[in-house]
Amino acid sequence: MLTINIVGILLIILIVWWFWLYKPEEVSASSEQITVLVENGTYQPARIKLLSGQATVVRFLRKDASPCAASVLVPDFEISKDLPLNKGVLMELPAMEKGEHDFHCQMQMYRGTFVVE
């Protein structure tokens, strides 16, 4: 009985860490185009640093056949793109002010953030 309780508590800690405490590594986008790989239930990279006041092009490449990965949304700018399997799709982002702007799939299971500095 004690073992089951310990395993349950460890699972709760893991869930809290994964959904609320975990911050993926940030990747800086230079003037070059950055590619976001959609694979295994995640965006890689999931946190992208961008320069404020500069328009940016992000390329999404979907490798995951899951229907949830079929599109990407940036609600702050009302941008939506369909992502065909194994084909790159370019998303043009307008010049942004400093702050964080989320991007995600239509069900918000795949999540990422543009960090504008």
Image (cartoon, helix red, strand yellow):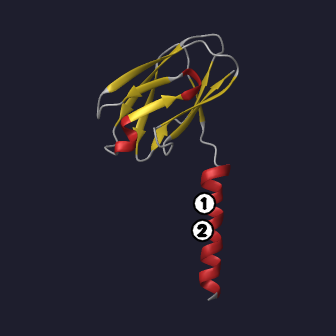
Residue type, mark 2 in image: Leu
Q: Examine the image and state in which quarter residue 5 appears.
A: bottom right
Residue 25, relative to residue 73: is it above or below? below
Q: Examine the image and state in which quarter residue 27 appears.
A: top right
Q: Quadrant of the N terminus?
A: bottom right
| Mark 2, other Cα within 10 Å: few <14 / some 14–19 / many ≥20 | few
Residue 6, relative to residue 90: is it above or below? below
Callout count = 2
Which labelled disc corresponds to residue 15?
A: 1
Residue type, mark 1 in image: Ile
Residue 22: image location, x then y, percent: 64, 48
Tag 2–tag 1 contact (CB < 8 Å):
yes
Residue 43: image location, x then y, percent: 47, 38
Residue at image position (36%, 23%) is 89
Alpha-carbon span between mark 2 and mark 1: 6 Å
Residue 14, relative to residue 86: is it above or below? below
List the residue tagged with mark 2: 11
Residue at image position (49%, 22%) is 79
Q: Examine the image and state in which quarter residue 83 appears.
A: top left
Element at label 2? helix
- Give 17 or 96, whichever is nearer the viewer: 96
| Mark 1, other Cα within 10 Å: few <14 / some 14–19 / many ≥20 | few
